């Protein structure tokens, strides 16, 4: 089957799950085209992402003349479809979070995607995220009748479902994927009841590289790693407050923030004010192999998010036999079992996070190893890339049977 993926930015350091999904479908014999609006704003450091960048058509990197030619080709080929898509833009654009002008841009992007899909004989268009990538897919469908689907991760789609016309996108899609049962339940809130059968559960998957135990590198003090984009929803400032309290109690540990993002300057200032800098490392964006190395040095992972879908970083840590401390939100409780594979605390509760981290630091190595093995078993019961790719393939083939 000939499938195209459309994402606003691809490849990206935080989108390894998309790369794994694409490669798994290719391994099953399908032709995959990668389309993106632009290259990522952050550095592409992973060698596999650099390879993906060479395979991806990034719209804003194309010569202007070529884009205009593609746009004109769609205008000539689908004049009535473009009129239908324009009416849809005028209906959903004014009340949207991005406004009418941005939706005109989506219409132009959709016209170019239609041109690319026609040239490559694409049978189905899939996008990740129910925000602007799904809007482009919806408009491409409206222009040319192109079959499309999209994967919703959260939390952005759940924060503003009406402003992104989520129900309209679901109504016209062949199917819609949620990465957790919680996510599917949120989609049910905004879909027509008649569209509920379209809402499917396909987890993000992990590949074989996460099956082998990482080579443990002993450190002088325990290391706790937090993997994720440095953004407000990930709860880094809550984590700093908890770390400060534990250090005042006399605990010795090192906190590793693996990632980068817009909150980094604020995190660095706040950490300096709390006197945490001697105990803190911020790695910036690192490759998948470097993430594995950080988890190998760590006794556990912590992610005190206040808004989420189902973080891939938690899956990776559990696959590598590391207990996880996280929060009782979104899809996280579907994976992390308190007392068995880690700890769950109320989101935003510094004292509860301190209690969990204290228990972690007081735990003997045998208990942590037992929790790590339980975490490994649980994540591969639910998040094997081969099985999840097969589920997605079945949905695609069913649509085109």
Image: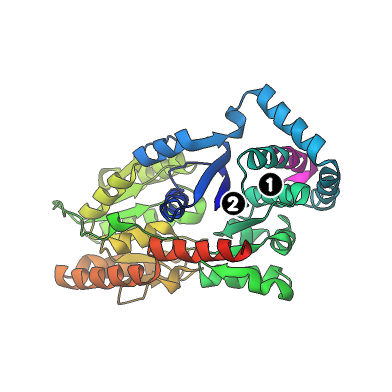
Residue situated in front as seen by the camera: 260 or 58? 58
Return the x and y of residue 127 as percentages of the image width and height: 59, 51
The crowding category of the residue bearing disc 2, from other C-alpha atoms within 10 Å (few below 14, some 14 to 19, many at least 20), is many
Residue situated in front as seen by the camera: 181 or 108? 108
Element under disc 2: strand
Query: Magenta part of the protein: which range?
Result: 97-109
Task: State the CA–CA distance, disc 1 to disc 2.
Answer: 9 Å
Labels 1 & 2 near each other (Cβ < 8 A): yes
Disc 1 target residue: 136
Q: Is residue 203 visible?
A: no
Residue 384 as seen in the image, left or right of residue 90:
left
Q: Quadrant of residue 67?
A: top right
**How are the residues colored?**
rainbow
Disc number for residue 294: none
> Which secondary structure dominates the residues rendered in magenta?
helix
Quarter containing the C terminus: bottom right
Q: Is residue 110 above or below residue 29?
A: above
Element under disc 1: helix
Residue at 46% in and 33% down: 54
Q: Residue furthest front?
A: 401
Residue 163 as seen in the image, left or right of residue 313:
right
Disc 2 target residue: 127
Residue at 73% in and 56% down: 163
Q: Is residue 139 visible?
A: yes
The crowding category of the residue bearing disc 1, from other C-alpha atoms within 10 Å (few below 14, some 14 to 19, many at least 20), is many
Residue at 73% in and 75% down: 194
Q: How many marks?
A: 2
* Residue 357 falls inside the magenta stretch: no
Residue situated in front as seen by the camera: 102 or 143? 143
Return the x and y of residue 93 as percentages of the image width and height: 79, 48
């Amino acid at each position: 089957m000939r499938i195209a993926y459309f994402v606003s930015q691809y490849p990206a350091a935080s989108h390894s799950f998309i790369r794994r999904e694409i490669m798994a479908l290719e391994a099953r014999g399908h032709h995959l085209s990668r389309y993106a609006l632009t290259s990522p704003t952050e550095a592409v450091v992973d060698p596999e992402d650099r390879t993906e960048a060479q395979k991806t058509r990034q719209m804003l990197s194309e010569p202007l003349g070529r884009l205009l030619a593609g746009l004109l080709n769609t205008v000539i080929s689908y004049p009535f479809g473009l009129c239908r898509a324009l009416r849809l833009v005028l209906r959903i654009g004014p009340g949207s979070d991005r406004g009418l002008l941005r939706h005109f841009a989506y219409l132009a992007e959709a016209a170019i995607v239609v041109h690319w899909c026609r040239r490559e004989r694409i049978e189905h268009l899939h996008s990740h995220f129910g925000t602007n990538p799904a809007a482009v897919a919806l408009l491409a469908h409206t222009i040319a009748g192109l079959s499309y689907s999209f994967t919703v991760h959260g939390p952005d789609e759940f924060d503003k479902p009406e402003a992104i016309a989520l129900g309209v996108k679901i109504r016209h899609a062949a199917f819609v994927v949620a990465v957790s049962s919680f996510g599917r339940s949120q989609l049910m809130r905004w879909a027509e009841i008649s569209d509920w059968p379209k809402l499917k559960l396909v987890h993000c998957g992990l590949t074989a590289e996460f099956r082998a135990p990482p080579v443990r590198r002993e450190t002088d003090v325990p290391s706790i790693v937090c993997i994720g984009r440095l953004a407000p929803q990930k709860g880094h400032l809550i984590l700093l407050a908890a770390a400060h309290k534990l250090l005042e109690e006399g605990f010795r540990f090192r906190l590793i923030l693996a990632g980068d993002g817009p909150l980094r300057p604020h995190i660095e200032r706040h950490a300096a004010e709390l006197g945490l800098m001697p105990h803190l490392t911020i790695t910036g964006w690192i490759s998948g192999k470097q993430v594995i190395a950080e988890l190998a040095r760590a006794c556990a992972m912590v992610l005190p998010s206040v808004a989420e879908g189902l973080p891939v970083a938690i899956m990776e840590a559990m696959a590598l036999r590391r207990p996880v401390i996280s929060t009782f939100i979104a899809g996280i409780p579907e994976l992390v079992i308190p007392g068995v594979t880690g700890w769950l605390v109320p989101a935003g509760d510094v004292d509860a996070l301190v209690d969990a981290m204290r228990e972690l630091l007081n735990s003997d190595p045998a208990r942590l190893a037992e929790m790590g093995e339980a975490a490994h078993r649980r994540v591969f019961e639910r998040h094997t890339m081969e099985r999840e790719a097969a589920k997605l393939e079945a949905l695609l083939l069913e649509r085109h049977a």
